[in-house]
Image (cartoon, rainbow, N blue to C red):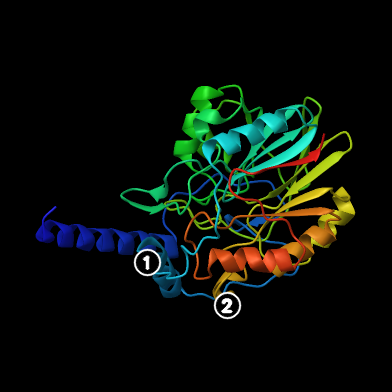
């Protein structure tokens, strides 16, 4: 490519990134139908309990989005050595999981594959090379493992919220073509978006509501977050964590969350869990990220509050979402007593 065309491409990319950042930083059109929920009012969903309120302005949101989309976080690609397993290693781990009663495989970011109650459950499937909408997309730092072609048939999908790094329509379409009968659990006001991917069995649950899928119990629980997905209005869709239970095994998937009083309430109403999948990335700078993303130390505290004997760190080392280095994300969670798998690694929790 000539220098002139390269410069023009960069200018166009910067312009598109700026336009996307402005849309992300504010609110756009499209209203959803009113929802009957205790945490819905004035046309949007809300957090509950005590938590940190967002303080960033629209301009500060736009600046953050531009930095993210243009790759201006200098430490974001500092990945640990041997961060990603090879395809054969990851596929061997899934074969081990198939023979286990209870296991977790970290595919990358918030995407995990859990074997529980004889079923395969996937969280927040994001399997493509990029995320986003339109011409400006954010590239992965590390590939998913196992590759999508190496995944077993998926029985259940749970989605925490509709931000692009957690609800990727391209990934969902790919899974729907291979697994049209998969049951997908989503937060309130999110089902219509997921049905566009081709799934017909999409079930919305409000916080603390439960459903059965064979021998598996699925419960939606609160999280502290929000949803920014233009052109939908800010927080027009809800956000959730999830508890999966089958027999003696209980797993908590927090989704994206800030820190607050809700975790004690979840423990009181839903009981303790054995394993917690908690986010350990996208936490710096704290003044900007604290309302939405816990620090690694807070993630470990959430797992302890939930009674988990195993705290597994996810939501890190996959996309350049914030300024802190992935090596620091990992180091701090390990220091707090957590477990940090490599991408593609399977943890057998009960044979």
Label 2 sits on a secondary structure element that is helix
Please provide percent x and percent y for residue 101: 80, 32
Please provide percent x and percent y for residue 207: 74, 48
Judged left or right of residue 59, residue 39 is right
| Residue drawn where x is 77% and y is 61% of the image | 302
Q: Quadrant of the C terminus?
A: top right
Task: Note whether 61 is above or below 212 in the view shown.
Answer: below
- Residue count near mark 1 (Cα–Cα under 10 Å), binned few <14, some 14–19, many ≥20: many
210 or 114: which is nearer to us? Answer: 114
- Residue count near mark 2 (Cα–Cα under 10 Å), binned few <14, some 14–19, many ≥20: few
Label 1 sits on a secondary structure element that is helix
| Residue drawn where x is 66% and y is 64% of the image | 258
278 or 108: which is nearer to us? Answer: 108
- Residue identifier under label 1: 66
Q: Is residue 292 visible in the rendered structure shown here?
A: no
- Residue identifier under label 2: 287
42 or 228: which is nearer to us? Answer: 228
Task: Note whether 153 is above or below 309 in the view shown.
Answer: above
């Amino acid at each position: 490519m000539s220098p002139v065309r390269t410069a023009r491409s960069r200018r166009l990319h910067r312009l598109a990134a700026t336009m996307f950042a402005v849309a992300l930083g504010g609110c756009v059109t499209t209203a959803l139908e009113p929802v009957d929920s205790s945490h819905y009012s004035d046309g949007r969903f809300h957090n509950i309990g005590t938590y940190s309120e967002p303080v960033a302005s629209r301009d500060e949101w736009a600046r953050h989005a531009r930095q993210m989309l243009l790759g201006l976080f200098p430490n974001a690609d500092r990945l640990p050595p041997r961060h990603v397993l090879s395809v054969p290693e990851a596929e061997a781990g899934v074969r081990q999981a198939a023979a286990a009663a209870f296991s977790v495989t970290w595919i990358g970011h918030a995407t995990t594959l859990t074997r529980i109650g004889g079923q395969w459950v996937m969280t927040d499937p994001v399997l493509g090379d990029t995320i986003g909408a339109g011409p400006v997309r954010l590239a992965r730092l590390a590939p998913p493992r196992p590759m999508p072609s190496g995944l077993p048939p998926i029985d259940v999908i749970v989605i925490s919220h509709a931000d692009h790094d957690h609800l990727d329509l391209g990934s969902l379409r790919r899974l729907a073509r291979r697994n049209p009968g998969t049951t997908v659990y989503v937060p309130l006001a999110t089902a219509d978006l997921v049905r566009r991917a081709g799934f017909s069995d999409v079930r919305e649950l409000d916080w603390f509501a439960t459903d059965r899928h064979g021998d598996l119990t699925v419960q939606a629980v609160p999280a502290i977050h929000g949803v920014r997905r233009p052109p939908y209005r800010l927080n027009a869709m809800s956000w959730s964590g999830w508890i999966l239970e089958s027999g003696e095994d209980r797993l908590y998937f927090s989704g994206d969350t800030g820190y607050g009083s809700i975790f004690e309430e979840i423990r009181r109403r839903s009981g303790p869990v054995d394993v917690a999948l908690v986010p350990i990335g996208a936490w710096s700078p704290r003044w900007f990220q604290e309302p939405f993303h816990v620090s690694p130390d807070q993630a470990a505290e959430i797992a302890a509050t939930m009674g988990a004997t195993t705290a597994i760190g996810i939501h890190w080392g996959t996309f350049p979402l914030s300024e802190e280095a992935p090596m620091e994300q990992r180091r701090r969670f390990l220091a707090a007593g957590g477990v940090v798998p490599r991408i593609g690694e399977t943890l057998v929790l009960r044979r």
